[in-house]
Amino acid sequence: MPKRNDLEQKALHYVVGTGYQGVLQSDLWRELGASSREGSRVSIKLEEKGLVRREKELQEGRWTYRLYPKRLPASIETIVDCPCLLCPDNARCDPTTALSPKSCPKLTDWILNLGKPPAPTIAAPEDPSAPAELSIPEDDSVAESLDT
Ligand code: SF4
């Protein structure tokens, strides 16, 4: 049987790898080859340390927990759609001037939508001669993101 600290490290690494989807506690312990009893102890320990969040979930008629990482490693994907990267005002934007990230609606919208699913995009048609399908969201998020 692996030492508890090793198991905690492996469990945390696995949970972080699941990102926003999280992982069912039972699937995690199966993956790590631990017993459910040991797994429950380690999962509670990780929650007490503030490293994971546990949410109750009903799976096939039984209550279990889904574990989510509280922190995710930074990656380029997390900022690739930041409006500042392609902003024509980027060179003039400064927190000490009127054109400031402190009051920028584009940046504020982007921050407020972090972690939400991406806006729908135009799907490429299978038949190149057919018109592209566009799914229209119920809110104006796409239109607003296209505003400059
Ligand atoms: S904070 Fe706003 S104005 Fe400044 S660079 Fe970013 S998008 Fe442009």
Image: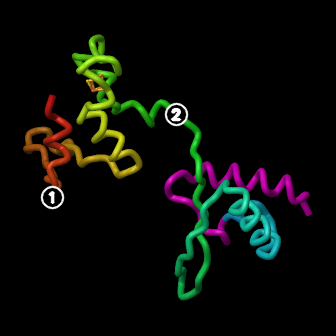
Whether disc 1's CB lies below 8 Å from ligand 1 is answered no
Magenta extent: 1-27
In the image, what residue occupies the spot 73% across and 57% down? 49
Q: Is residue 26 magenta?
A: yes
Between 101 and 43, the residue placed more toward the observer is 101
Q: Residue 138 shows which numbered tag?
A: 1
Q: Residue 75 shows which numbered tag?
A: 2
Picture coordinates of residue 96, whole percent (x, y): 34, 18
Mark 1 residue element: loop
* Labels 2 & 1 near each other (Cβ < 8 A): no
Picture coordinates of residue 123, whole percent (x, y): 21, 45
Between 73 and 101, the residue placed more toward the observer is 101
Mark 2 residue element: loop
Name the amino acid, label 1. Glu
Q: How is the image coloured?
A: rainbow
Placement of the N terminus among the 4 image quadrants: bottom right
Between 94 and 12, the residue placed more toward the observer is 94
Between 27 and 74, the residue placed more toward the observer is 74
Q: Dot 2: few (<14), some (14–19), or many (≥20) neighbours within 10 Å?
A: few
Picture coordinates of residue 74, whole percent (x, y): 54, 35
